Amino acid sequence: MSSKRVDGQTAYVLHLHPYSETSLVVDVFTRDHGRVPLVARGARRPRSAMRGALMSFQPLELGWFGGGEVKTLAKVEWLGGMPLLGGRCLLLGYYLNELLLKMLPREDAHSVLFDAYAAALRALAAGAADAPELRRFEKTLLKELGYGLTLDVDIASGRRVVPDGDYTYLIERGPVENLGAGDTAEGEAPRLHGKTLLDMVADDYSDPRTRMESRQLMRQLIAHHMGGKPLQSRRVFMELQEL
């Protein structure tokens, strides 16, 4: 593994946790190097210049060095230009971060996913509707990890999905039309209206049914590819909604 110094990397903080009495380990998502863990030495000290700059959901320019699994953070500079997330959007931002932390391998660069993450943060900060931004990011994440979705073709017949059709989505395969009232392929597989599948292709979530069914589908697909590991951000969000 290379020990050369890396400079000028645009990045976002995904997670911070203490490392010794004075330092932090910072998980960051960078455009050219993917997800990288960095030690921010002395960042827990009150007068540390790094302490106030390591902000989540804000574009940063970083530099680091080291050849081990965890590199040493050498420079952090806030780039600005991003409104702060608050309220519901803050929780949604933590959801995006948790997906990246739990699904993205370390040092696996995905520039398309990085751009999708930055675009989702900008849109949420600007007050955009949740559903299009979250579903767009989730689809991009799965595609970049090699789990791209087939949405507009019936995988059994090869025919195009029709808006008024009723389909079962077979995980890791795609939609199959339900030809009879009792036809329930593979038990717990998600059931969707054809219009939902086509709306997802077009990133059109104006229909309440599309929003509901697409959310259920993506929830099951992500749970499957995470091996059933729970998402803490989703649990917190649901608890707050109940309150």
Image: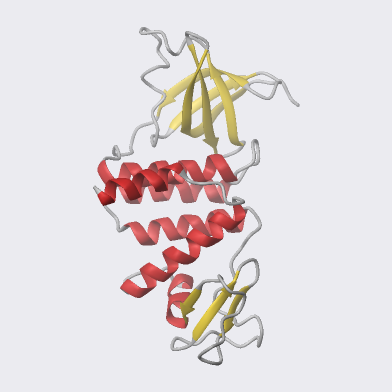
> Is 232 situated above or below 143?
above
Asked whether, in this view, residue 59 is left or right of residue 167, the answer is left
Is residue 204 in view from this perspective?
no
Q: Picture quarter containing residue 183?
A: bottom right
In the picture, the quarter occupied by the N terminus is: top right
- Name the residue furthest right: 1
- At 42% from the left edge and 68% from the top edge, which residue is drawn? 203
Between 42 and 233, the residue placed more toward the observer is: 233
Asked whether, in this view, residue 77 is left or right of residue 229, the answer is left
- Name the residue furthest bottom: 180
> Is 169 situated above or below 226?
below
> Is 158 situated above or below 128?
below
Residue 113 in percent (x, y) is at 54, 49
Q: Picture quarter containing residue 77?
A: top left
Between 179 and 39, the residue placed more toward the observer is: 179
Residue 212 in percent (x, y) is at 37, 68
Q: Picture quarter containing residue 46?
A: top left
Between 176 and 120, the residue placed more toward the observer is: 176
Is residue 156 in view from this perspective?
yes
- At 40% from the left edge and 50% from the top edge, which residue is drawn? 120
Residue 22 in percent (x, y) is at 47, 8
- Name the residue furthest left: 243
Asked whether, in this view, residue 162 is left or right of residue 148, the answer is left
Identify the image's colour scheme: rainbow, by chain, secondary structure or one colour.
secondary structure
Asked whether, in this view, residue 127 is left or right of residue 210, the answer is left
Number of marks: 0
> Is 177 situated above or below 4?
below
Residue 156 in percent (x, y) is at 66, 84
